[in-house]
Amino acid sequence: MRIGVLGSGPVGQAISLRLAELGHEVMIGTRNPKKLNEWQSDAGAKVKIGSFAEAAAHGEMIFNATNGSGSLSALTMAGEDHINGKILVDISNPLDASKGMPPSLFVSNTDSLAEQIQRAFPKVKVVKTLNTMNNQVMVRPRDLADGDHHVFLSGDDAQAKTQVAEVLRSFGWINILDLGDITTARGVEMYMALWLRLWGSINDPIYNIKIVKL
Amino acid sequence: MRIGVLGSGPVGQAISLRLAELGHEVMIGTRNPKKLNEWQSDAGAKVKIGSFAEAAAHGEMIFNATNGSGSLSALTMAGEDHINGKILVDISNPLDASKGMPPSLFVSNTDSLAEQIQRAFPKVKVVKTLNTMNNQVMVRPRDLADGDHHVFLSGDDAQAKTQVAEVLRSFGWINILDLGDITTARGVEMYMALWLRLWGSINDPIYNIKIVKL
């Protein structure tokens, strides 16, 4: 599949490399293509580099791996015409480091970043997922406890969630829990408040949660 | 130990019964003692009933099992003189059902109910714990996956957390993770947003999360 990944930080790089490794044609979209020159000549050789608009136009499916604070502007730069009708896998978190560390959230409780994106781009099929763990765990879940932990899906389009779940399974995910419509993204985004403090307590970002049921 | 439990809903009842079963002298404090008459003549026979002030005066350790929206007023009714210097195990969640279901939180993000309580009663040793699971799992964690899941501690007083951890172990808890000072209660309280949606997805409140590490 042709996939556009918006955002060239550690999450965007990890997602792009993994997707390329799995045989997809990946273009990473960035505000500053030059900063990826070195990366592309080494690890990222199979990944094309472009603007947000070029990466969005390239992708049949789009990943939002931008910083939460820049997600809406990145998607605006990507252009409605290039994203409408497509699945947008939203990995971003609405982190706000301006009020001290660990970061708080700039939207939460009665709204979420995923909902803001869905409202701003109503013709995009937003599926929130993968925002609840470190990028290494995102793309290689089996490297942690043989994949015996969970990832979540939130979104209004059932078929889009099914397609995203297929991509997650190709990454190695076994336990994929559909939480419901896009408003359930409030749950996974607010979990960041616990995730950040677990990181502080565990002192290692390579962990995840497993849902333990009867 | 003499223990006062503030709040006579399902959480207060479950905590009181379990503590009495473990040999503690328990008094449950409530706004309306009459509503517990039937309960006391049956399951709650070993538990004394009193006002918030009487239960607080009785306890060497106090549990706050009131509704989050009523916690500060319940503690005010309990009386500073009856709680100062004591450990307050805060199980409450700042749930707000006025903005639709599932509930949102009336304090979150850059503050927490536990911090509000600690600020209002600076001489009380507030330890936040047990607010992240159903009351049956709280008091009998081994009944779920032999206890292979986690409970968290947040609080400013290390010795108080050690004493609360002992009580948790007597309930059957194996995995007790100290998150840090009382501000880390923001994490466990905001996790409610995910907990409520997991409940909706799993369709059974008897579950918990396990931290999966390398």
Image (cartoon, coloured by chain):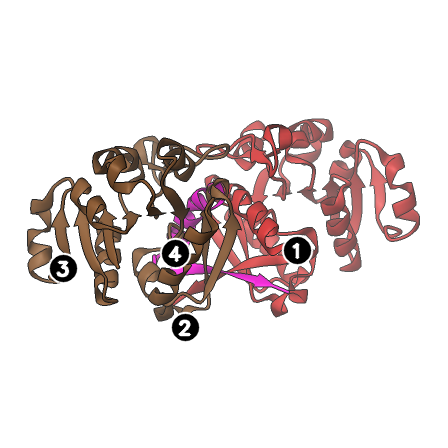
Chain colours: A red, B brown
Between the residue at mark 1 and the residue at mark 3, the CA separation in whole angstroms equals: 44 Å
Q: Earlier in the sequence, mark 2 or mark 4?
A: 2
Q: Earlier in the sequence, mark 4 or mark 3?
A: 3
Image quadrant in which the C terminus of chain B is located: bottom right
| Marks 4 and 1 belong to one chain | no
Provide residue B94's location: percent of width, then percent of height: 36, 38
Q: Looking at the image, do the residues carrying marks 4 and 3 touch, with CB atoms under 8 Å apart?
A: no
Which residue is denoted by mark 4 in the rendering?
B164
Which residue is denoted by mark 2 in the rendering?
B146
The mark lying in front, picked from 2 and 1, is 1
> What type is the residue that disc 4 sits on?
Val
Q: Nearer the viewer, residue A214 or B40?
A: B40
Kindly identify which numbered label has been placed on residue B44. 3
Q: Tag 3: Cα neighbours inside 10 Å, few (<14), some, or many (≥20)? A: some
Classify A80 as above or below A194: above
Between the residue at mark 2 and the residue at mark 1, the CA separation in whole angstroms equals: 26 Å
Q: Nearer the viewer, residue A76 or A163?
A: A76
Residue bounds of the magenta highlight: B186-214
Q: Tag 4: Cα neighbours inside 10 Å, few (<14), some, or many (≥20)? A: many
The mark lying in front, picked from 4 and 3, is 4
Tell me, yes or no, if residue B205 can be seen here.
Answer: yes
> What type is the residue that disc 3 sits on?
Gly
B106 relative to B9 in the view: left or right: right
Q: What subunit carries mark 3?
A: B
